[in-house]
Image: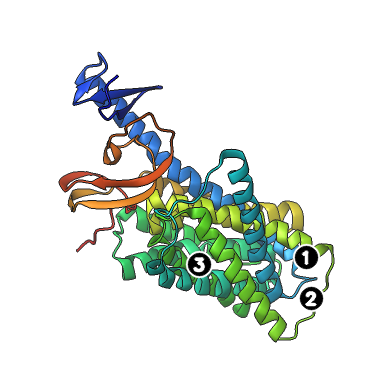
Amino acid sequence: MSSKPLCPLHLGPLRLYRRDGLLVSGLTHARRGRILLKQNFRTNLVPIAFAILAATLFGLSTPFAKLLVSNIPPVALAGLLYLGAFLGLGFYIVMRRIVSGHRTTSRSALRRADLPWLAGAILSGGILAPISLMVGLTLISGFSASLLLNMEGVATAIIATMLFKESVGRRLVIALVCMTAAGVLLSWDPSQGTWNIVGFMLLILAGFGWGLDNNLTRSICGRDPVQIALAKGGLAGTASMAIAIALGLNISIDAQIMWALVLGAVSYGASLVFFVLALQGLGASRTGVFFSLGPFVGAIVSILVLREWLGWVVVPALALMTLGVLALVYERHSHQHGHEETTHAHIHTHRDSSHDHCHTEPVREPHNHEHTHKTAVHDHVHWPDIHHRHTHD
């Protein structure tokens, strides 16, 4: 048997291998190109699915937190939600090791250089944003609060453009305008005919807190997403609970505490993992706009669970939301750009041209190991993912 490395080629349902450049297949070059093009398209859908799933889970948090905030002080509730994320992810890690023997490798583990990014993400998205949201929930309806969180997508894109020089195409601008208009429209309560300015500003503050969190997390999204979410949950939850205790808030030990922890495990813990996975493939601004679906999920649940309704404004807001998502999905960003030789480790598959390296034996996907990308200059459609962090004039 030869010991030469095997290079996986994903062609249809079959995984073929080439040895020393000889393709083990009778497919023509054109046919292989068409198949790879289709598979690259399907690969691009995976991070979109992660972003939508993260948004859906997070969207559930606002209406159910509205039910809990009447019995639990807002600052304490913010801490319990993140502690729930920590406990849920801790249980997942233990079960993953028992069932599959999986452990976080040193290549994907958080490093000392990641700590400033992680600390900033915890302060902005783990402490400031959830506390602002919980306090805001005591002032405005769960329906309005859910949809005002659309500002997170807008804030993420604004910060990504201003601080991290991500590109903003015409369709992305259209998506941001539509999402913002939908959020503002649905924040108006026709039955009361008034705005709650304090509640409104608190929700805007929460959106920008999570927007900054998204951009800071982008810089470490190549690390193990479960470990990132675990660190965020444990440290942010502990800090918020410490603030609640220092303020002398009355926290009753009852079943409401358990439900807050369960909600945190699902809506914050699992959502964080899927969000970090989405960041790897989409970049911060695109993930942020897809994440804007979460508030709409929260609004629907508010109608069903809290019996809240805003009347006719739901129809134009739904149209604006749909238009914004379609504008983002069909965005195409392409120009000539260069890649320097880079060696790094992150979760990946071999379904795209960036990861056509060889393995000495068949591999399971997705997987995580150290690999090298060669120097290249080319022109193709791309998003600001982990391999395309270049700036634009």
Query: What residue would you read off at disc 2?
Result: 251
Q: Is disc 1 in contact with disc 3, using a CB cutoff of under 8 Å?
A: no
Query: What residue would you read off at disc 1?
Result: 257
Give above or below for 253 relative to 58.
below
Query: What residue would you read off at disc 3?
Result: 210
Q: Nearer the viewer, mark 1 or mark 3?
A: 1
Position of 199 with respect to 64 (left or right) is: left
Mark yes or no: residue 140 visible: yes
Q: Circle 1 sits in a helix, a strand or a loop, which is it?
A: helix
Q: CA distance from mark 3 to mark 2?
A: 26 Å
Sequence-wise first label, 1 or 3: 3
Q: Amino acid at mark 1?
A: Ile
Q: CA distance from mark 2 to mark 1?
A: 9 Å
Q: Amino acid at mark 3?
A: Trp
Position of 268 with respect to 152 (left or right) is: right
Q: Is disc 2 in contact with disc 1, using a CB cutoff of under 8 Å?
A: yes
* Residue lying at 27% horizontally and 49% vertically, measured from the top left: 333
Sequence-wise first label, 3 or 2: 3
